[in-house]
Amino acid sequence: MPRFDRLATLYFFCPLQRYALAGESGIPILMYHSISEVTEERAHPYYWTATTPAIFADHMRHLHEQNYKTVSLQEAVNRIETPGGKREKLAVLTFDDGYQDFYTHAFPALNRYGFSATVFLPTAYIGETSRSFKGTDCLTWNQVRDLGKAGIHFGSHTVTHPQLRTLRAEAIRDEVRCSKETIEEKLGHRVLSFAYPYALPETDRAFRRELRGILAEAGYEAGVSTTIGTADQTGDRFFLKRLPANSADDRRLFDAKLAGAYDWLHTLQYAWKLRPTCLSAGHSPAW
């Protein structure tokens, strides 16, 4: 099916970017979900959340060949908030939902190039034996601990993966605090990062202000959202922008996303979120 976002990115915004004045560039935070052979042909590629192992391996190979260095979310925040340091090609790799295929398919490719990553766990679906979320098996705590020893970072993705905007403040506190405490208990160290489930209602400033206070109160120091774009100084450290990645990202589109040429899509995303029905619970698009 036609890819308007791809065509506009490659044939308008990429050339336009070449003529733009160089300045402080943002850091691409890539958002992956399942690394598997799942097919999503009925949905538009923009909404796909799965990446085949072969395409994911190619993405990682491309990062390596282009001399990207992967950093933790906390380090990325420090670099963004303290500009003027050494200019490097940096990227942050994130994975939502804690799927078991991260252990079997993503980690071997990451390990091949010495890349780091952060996996965000919805703790109700992480058990001593495998549990299923959205029909897909999730990591077990033993696997989480093994990955942690190998340098993988973990953050919270709430307990039950709800659309937080539909909950009362106390229920939101329970979701963000209990998930954090569970991961800390299982791993034995602090958890500082959070990923918002579903589409962030960025147009609701009052909700964002409330949630930001709850996250800070719970002890988080950084967070990511589904808002499209590279992370830069204009953003909020608790709702950093990310770049969705999936099986439809060939090397040209993937490279354009890394370079910031996909950031234009945030304007359309924001306009879509202004629609009164777009954030009904359980029916929000992935981003």
Image (spheres, helix red, strand yellow):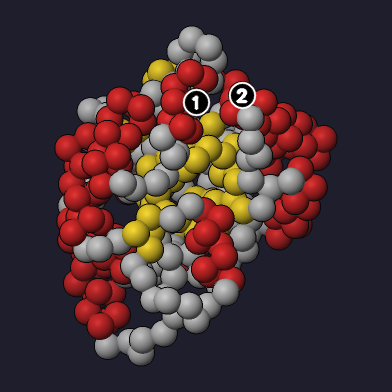
Q: Amino acid at mark 2?
A: Lys
- From the viewer's perspective, is residue 237 above or below residue 11? above
Instruction: Give the residue displayed 56% in from the left and 39% down from the top.
Output: 155
Rendered image quadrant of residue 65: bottom left
With 61 as the anchor, is 127 left or right in this view? right
Percent of width and height locating residue 274: 58, 58
Instruction: Give the residue displayed 44% in from the left and 25% down from the top.
Output: 146
Percent of width and height locating residue 245: 33, 48
Marks 1 and 2 close (CB-CB < 8 Å): yes
Of all residues, the one furthest to the right in this rendering is 170
In the rendered image, which residue does mark 2 sit on?
A: 186
Q: Amino acid at mark 1?
A: Arg
Instruction: Give the residue displayed 52% in from the left and 59% down from the top.
Output: 75
Give residue 85's mark. Answer: none
Which of these two is toward me, 135 or 156? Answer: 156
Q: Circle 1 — which element?
A: helix
In the rendered image, which residue does mark 1 sit on?
A: 145
Percent of width and height locating residue 141: 52, 20
With 175 as the anchor, is 26 left or right in this view? left
Between the C-alphas of marks 1 and 2, the distance is 8 Å
With 155 as the anchor, is 174 left or right in this view? right
How crowded pointer 1 is (Cα within 10 Å; few <14, some 14-19, many 20+) is rated as some
Of all residues, the one furthest to the top in this rendering is 129
Q: Is residue 283 visible?
A: no
Q: Is residue 63 visible?
A: yes
How crowded pointer 2 is (Cα within 10 Å; few <14, some 14-19, many 20+) is rated as few
Percent of width and height locating residue 263: 39, 67
State which tag comes first along the sequence, 1 or 2: 1
Instruction: Give the residue displayed 43% in from the left and 55% down from the top.
Output: 71
With 192 as the anchor, is 15 left or right in this view? left
